[in-house]
Image: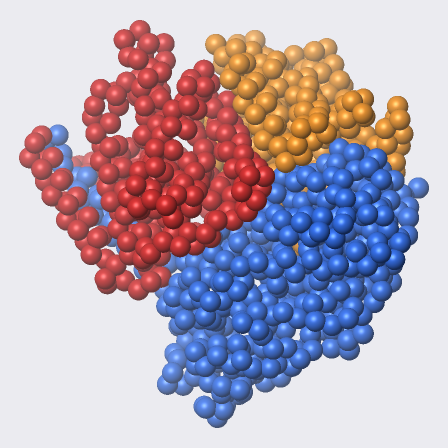
Chain colours: A red, B blue, C orange
Amino acid sequence: MTRALWLALVIAAVAVAVLAYMPSQLGPYPLGLMIGIMSYVVLATAWAMFSGPTRYISLATVAFFGLGAYTVAVLGDYLPYPLVLACAGLVGLVVALIVGVFTLRLAGVYFVVFTFGLTELIRQVVTWYEVNVTRTLGRYIFLDITTEQIYWQLLGLAVITIGIAFWVRRSRIGLALRVIGDDEVVAAHSGINIPATKIALFGVSSMIMALAGAIQSPRWTYIEPSIVFNPTISFLTVIMALLGGANRLWGPLLGAVPLFLLFEWLSAHFPNHYSIILGLLFIAIVFALPNGVLAFGEGLWQRLRRREAHS
Amino acid sequence: MSTSGLKAPMKRRALIGASALTAMALALAPVSAGAQDGERDSIRIGYAVPLTGPNATGAGITTIPNYKLWVHDVNADGGIELSALGKTLPVEVIEYDDRSSTEEAVRAIERLATQDNVDFILPTWGTGPNLATGPTFDRFGYPQLAATAVTDLAGEMANRWDKSFWMLGGGYDYAVALVDLLSEQRDAGTINNKVAVISVADGFGIDLSKAALPAFEAAGFEVVYEQSYPLGTSDFAPIINEVSGLGADTFVAFSYPPGTFALTQQSVVSGFNPKVFYLGVGTAFPVYPNIAGENVEGVMGIGGVDPDSEAIKDYFERHTEVTGNPPDSWASAVTYASLQMLQQAIERVGDVDRDAVAKELSTGTFDTILGEVKLVDNQLRSLWTVGQWQDGQFVGLAHTEREGARDPIIPKPEFKPAE
Amino acid sequence: MLLSALLTGLVLGGTYALIAMGLTLQYGVARIMNLAYGDFMIAAAFGAFVLFTSLGINPLLGMIAVIPAGFALSYAIYGVMLQPLARRAKHSGRLEVDSILATFGLLFVIQGVALVIFGANFVSYSYLAIPINILGTTLAANRVLALVLALALGAGLYYALTHTRWGTAIRAVAVSPQAAPLVGIDVDRVSRFAFALGGALAASGGVVVSMYLTFSATAGVVFTMKALVVVIMGGVGNLLGALAAGLILGIVETLVATYIDTGLTLAATYLIFLAILVFRPSGLFGRRPS
């Protein structure tokens, strides 16, 4: 057990070191690609941390992502950068906790649409505030942060996120959450504080999303609500996590990486038929890989091993 | 977990890792591996524009058709002459979809600049996306000819990114021109001094209303109604019903499509007939007369073209012939002119030297469909600001540098609802 | 003023109700969270547009062709694409995830085809843009038509659901797809029929909306989301709930625009929606989840 854990840790450390070294070997475009991938790895893993075990499908990813970006835009000129990041995370956490208290009673589809409504509400309120109070919609972020630094920050965030996800899975909270997903009544009778557990996880996962938005925002210089509250981000996060397998630690990562590269490849090679091909692929994936990539891979592996054992 | 149990996931992970790397290599591969330098046989021009997502409509009307038309025109002429190489080379295009996302647009420019090694990059559509991709153009030293960005910060941006060129003015230009034009009409007694202003809660609407409201007040107008409405509003009945009872002769909407169209339809149906009916983006679109029908006559809006220019007339005909649709009467001609400037700058330099081309763009004088053009501080300051539909044409009424070509029709003809 | 605002709001609400009723059937009965719903509407709108502008067939007559086409297409899509997913799913959460993913793909396919055929331009035509005066308020005839159609379809379908054998079967599947087979109901067939009926309603909504709203190939998502909000507010699978929720949303938007601030109309919509969800988690008329 411990030996295996140590080995896993060493492998992980080597992998992170290689990833951290990569910017010096890569040109700007592959680095941009890595940033995009890393961003979705973070978002999908954070999403799955809460939504995987509870089976609550949240479409609010971009709400927190956008809040993070806006925090940087608002505070970037006044506070030192690390403090700005801390504020962004805090904003995400606080909003998530408030929302969490209200969403306790919702389940299933109601939660899905609630989170979508929440995103739109936040976007509308931010827009209204900017229009009527500050009278400028767009904000500029002129921070001296290089692409490499954005990448390293996202890498760090990804490591922390996966670390937290790993810890949650092994801890009592993780068990509690899986029980909620299976049966709330049983969970309630087994003495698990469901509401507190759910809210805590929702808060942590939202905080990570806010940080992801905050870290990436200096890359664009200019932000406005339609840029940072783009609902596509929420949808892609869900799809990637579900595709990889939201109930496994590495599932979201294994959904995010290939899908992201696929989008990139399609938009470059079939710019005019991108939508159609993407749509058909999606439908095909649902039919061919019903339990996500990871489960499919495992199934395949087991079948191969069985065949080996027979021969 | 036992040690033997660990092996399986590790091997599996290695397998998955290997396939991920293969996928990545595939995605990274340049779209066309044209050998350059040694035997250059084309000038490579790349662009990433929104082909899908919410910005696809705007780009599909103004930006993409003009890129296509220009490439068609250049190649039909044999290409661009590069005197340094002693050849005339055709333009080769690399096109990406930025999916209406800023992050995608930034990455696509990184890709065009460093993977595809294109010679020039054409900008994406819209104010926000152009501002957001500015630093990336700058980082790789590519000139950015932003022909669809309206920003009051154009001067500041041009200072910050010295190869960026801002071709469509700022909200201030348009708002002040409108107020000046209306002041004249008020002083002549054509309209009363009451004005109702609405604006879309979007960068464009705010910039314009922020400039227009103080200008109206300063000119002695009484602003009897002032509200913003969210992007995506589909029903304007409450606004029109309220405004129509306030006795304002002038209705100004700094609107965005499709709101621009819905406002027109609602006003017609409600029998709202201000003497001046001014709308924002979309008024100059070729689809607008189809929507307004015969009520199009006299509608005022942002933009406009010179109705007496032969070059513009010819441009409209070629645009319709090559792309299947007429251009819009505001940013389309500016977009095409920006490409003509790029071509002339390249030919004068005689090479694809981006620094020299950028320098030529900011200092040279160019012959375009807009007439003779010279940039001031990297900005096009010679702009049509207020236009009006007259006889099926969206003619310019006010210009920043010359007298308006046409007099406004005020009051506009009454709206006639369908029978 | 108040009366006028209420009437304007009712008419707007009619549009919302009309676009939501099909989705509530698809979602409530067939258990398909159809993210491509709005794109179905856009497809129907394009259909009406082509019939009107190139063949001169007015959209009301055009409906006679477009609605059955919507029914047939949805029927086929359910049979080919969604039925296998429904059969495979062991519990409703599973079907929800699968249907979200599959219809998300469908959304891209429909949008992509529309982009290839019609390009990214705005499309608009005007039909029945006639002012009519009701109680001193001037309203557009085409928008009033949407309200009338919503009320008629809502009432008609409600009657059919409560007074016919088919209706009873549909309601039984909506309440409990597990128990319905026990009383001899073919859940597959009923779901397929309900999904197709929802598609027909989407088509009728698309045709009516195309008379007064400018649309484009990429505008479908807006309708899907509006419809989803109305469906959830009214209670999933509840036709009268969708009708009421649609009307309430319309009235709230108009009142906010008239009396508070036009900039807050959409914020108010979502606030009301969230409030209803918080205080009545299964919608205005929804049953409590068991």
- Judging depth in this view, the residue of C85 and B202 nearest the camera is B202
Rendered residue at 17%/39% (across/down): B8
Q: Position of residue B31 (x, y in %)?
A: 42, 66
Q: Residue furthest bottom?
A: B86
Which of the 4 image quadrants contains residue B110? Answer: bottom left
Instruction: Tell me how many marks there are.
Output: 0
- Judging depth in this view, the residue of C58 and B162 nearest the camera is B162
- For the question of whether residue A5 can be seen, the reply is yes
Q: Does residue B53 appear to the left or right of C53 in the view shown? A: left
Q: Quadrant of the N terminus of chain C?
A: top right
Q: Position of residue A43 (x, y in %)?
A: 36, 39
Which of the 4 image quadrants contains residue B37? Answer: bottom left
Query: In the rendered view, would you say C284 is above or below A120?
Result: above
Rendered residue at 27%/37% (across/down): A161
- Judging depth in this view, the residue of B101 and C153 nearest the camera is B101
Rendered residue at 26%/51% (across/down): A152
Q: Position of residue A274 (x, y in %)?
A: 51, 54
Rendered residue at 41%/19% (across/down): A101
- Judging depth in this view, the residue of B203 and C165 nearest the camera is B203
- For the question of whether residue B54 can be seen, the reply is no
Q: Does residue A75 appear to the left or right of A112 in the view shown? A: left
